Amino acid sequence: HNLKVHFPVKKGIFQRTQGFVRAVDDVSFEITRGETFGLVGESGCGKSTTGRAVLNLIKPTSGQVWFGREDLATISPPQMREKRKDMQMVFQDPYASLNPRFTIEQILEEPLKAHQIGDSGQRQRMIADMMDVCGLNRSYLKRYAHEFSGGQRQRICIARALILKPQLIVADEPVSALDVSIQSQILNLLQDIQEEFGLTYLFISHDLAVVKHLCNRLGVMYLGRMAELGTAEKIYAKPLHPYTQSLLSAIPAADPRRKKERILLRGEVPSPSNPPAGCAFVTRCPKAEAICKEVRPTMIQLEEDHGVACHLYT
Ligand code: SF4
Ligand code: MG
C-alpha cells in the first residue's frame, strides 16, 4: 500500500547523501490467497526491490506491507521471525544462492533448525519427502550444490523454500538463468506444488511470455511505478498502457498469420535517481502529450480488475 523504497546515493569522501534512487515509488497492489501475481517490467524497474520489501527483507521508506491482517512494520521481531516461515523466496540465480560448503541435506535442514522444527529423525523424513516432491533423487543428499545442473539447483532452492510450508513464495526471475529446455520443467514444478500446498506466488519476471500461462493477475512496473494492473486475461487481450503495449508487441504471435505490429521504444530508461517530473514513461512513449511532462498520472480503475496509470484514459 503506497510502497516507497528510496535508497540514498552517497558520494565523496564524507559519503554525503547526494540524492535518492527511487527504486519503488508509490506502488500499491494486492495478492489474493492462492493466486499467482506476476510483477513484470524491464531490469531496474523496481520489481525485485518490491519483492524484497514484501518479504520485509528491505524496510520501506514509506507505505505498508500487509500480510493477512498484519502490517509487517508494526509486528515485533519475534513475531516477524515466526512470520518468516510463512513467506519464502526463490532467487534468480540458483548458483549464487546455495552455500557451496553445505551438502544438499544440510541446505535443506538449515531452515528447519533455525526454526527449531522437529528432532533429527523427523527432519530427515521431512527432507526426504521434500526431495521427492521437488523431483530430486534422495541419493543426492550427501552431495554438494556445485555437482548439479542449474535446473537441479533451482529444484534444491525450491525445496528449501518449501520445507517450512510457507503460504507465500516470492519467486524472483526463477527461470531466467536456466536453459529454455529446463525452464518449462521448473515452471511445471512451481505449478504442481502450488496446487499441492495451496501456495500463493509473487512471480517476478522481465518476460511477459514466461508469465503468460502462469499468472492470474499482473502488475506492470516501469521506473519504480505501477503502469498497469489487472487480470492476466484482460492485460494480454487488451493492454492499455503504451508501455505494456510495447512489451506485448515483442512477443511473437501464436498464429503467424496474425500480423503483429512491433512497437519499438526509442531511448533509454531514465535514471531512477532523476525520474521525469510527470509520467515516468514520457521520454519513450510514442503517444505522449503535453500534460505527460508535467503531471504524474495516477492509477485509474477502468474496469473491475483492470487499472492503468496513463493520461490517455483520463
Ligand atoms: Fe505515454 Fe502520457 Fe500515458 Fe505516460 S501518461 S504512458 S507519456 S501517454
Ligand atoms: Mg531483479
Image (cartoon, grey):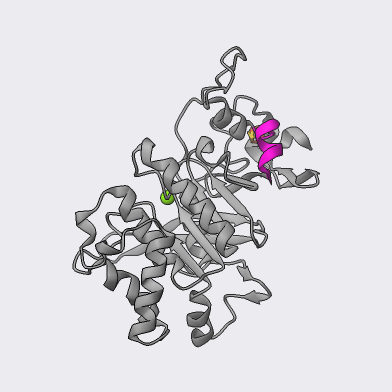
Q: Quadrant of residue 145?
A: bottom left
Question: Which residue is nearer to you in this view: 240 or 286?
Answer: 240
Q: Is residue 234 left or right of residue 4?
A: right
Residue in view at x 62 percent, y 29 percent = 245
Residue 28, magenta (yes or no): no
Specify the segment rendered in magenta.
230-241
Task: Estimate the x, y position of residue 39 in percent, counting from the top left.
Answer: 55, 49
Q: Quadrant of residue 75?
A: bottom right
Q: Quadrant of the C terminus?
A: top right
Q: Is residue 66 shown left or right of residue 265?
A: right
Residue at image position (28%, 57%) is 96
- Say whether residue 60 is visible: yes
The magenta stretch spans residue 233: yes
Q: Quadrant of ligand 1?
A: top right
Q: Is residue 194 above or below residue 114?
A: above
Q: Position of residue 101 (x, y in %)?
A: 18, 68
Point out residue 203 in the picture as x, y percentages from the top left corner.
52, 52
Query: Is residue 202 placed above or below 118 in the rendered structure?
Result: above
Quarter in which the N terminus is drawn: bottom right
Residue drawn at (41%, 42%), measured in percent from left and top?
Answer: 183
